[in-house]
């Protein structure tokens, strides 16, 4: 929970972390559609 609150307070999350999450979700979606 502390981590979630910390991220919520962060107005500028790490672009690399955000990009990695997006790629992870996109990769999962691609696997699901196959």
Image (cartoon, rainbow, N blue to C red):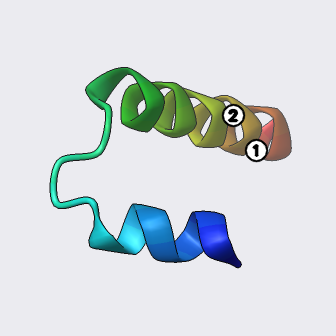
Give the alpha-carbon distance from disc 2 to disc 1, as whole Å: 5 Å
Q: Is residue 19 left or right of residue 23?
A: left
Q: Which residue is mark 2?
A: 30
Q: Is residue 16 left or right of residue 10?
A: right
Give the residue at the far left of this rendering. 11
Where disc 1 sits, the SS reads helix
Q: Residues within 10 Å of mark 2 (few under 14, many from 20)?
A: few
Q: Is residue 8 above or below residue 28?
A: below
**At which x and y percent is residue 15?**
28, 28
Q: Which mark is residue 23?
A: none
Residue at figure coordinates x 47%, y 38% from the top left: 22
Q: Are marks 2 and 1 in contact (CB under 8 Å)?
A: yes
Observer-nearest residue: 14 or 2? 2
**At which x and y percent is residue 24?**
64, 32
Question: Where on the picture, by quarter, is residue 25?
Answer: top right
Q: Which residue is mark 1?
A: 33
Q: Is residue 23 left or right of residue 30?
A: left
Q: Quadrant of the C terminus?
A: top right
Residue at figure coordinates x 46%, y 65% from the top left: 6
Residue at figure coordinates x 32%, y 33% from the top left: 14
Where disc 2 sits, the SS reads helix
Residue at figure coordinates x 16%, y 60% from the top left: 11
Q: Is residue 29 above or below residue 27?
A: below
Observer-nearest residue: 8 or 18? 8
Q: Quadrant of the N terminus?
A: bottom right
**At which x and y percent is residue 13?**
29, 45
Total count of labels: 2
């Amino acid at each position: 929970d502390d981590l979630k609150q910390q991220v919520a307070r962060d107005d500028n999350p790490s672009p690399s972390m955000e990009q990695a999450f997006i790629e992870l979700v996109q990769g999962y979606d691609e696997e699901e559609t196959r």
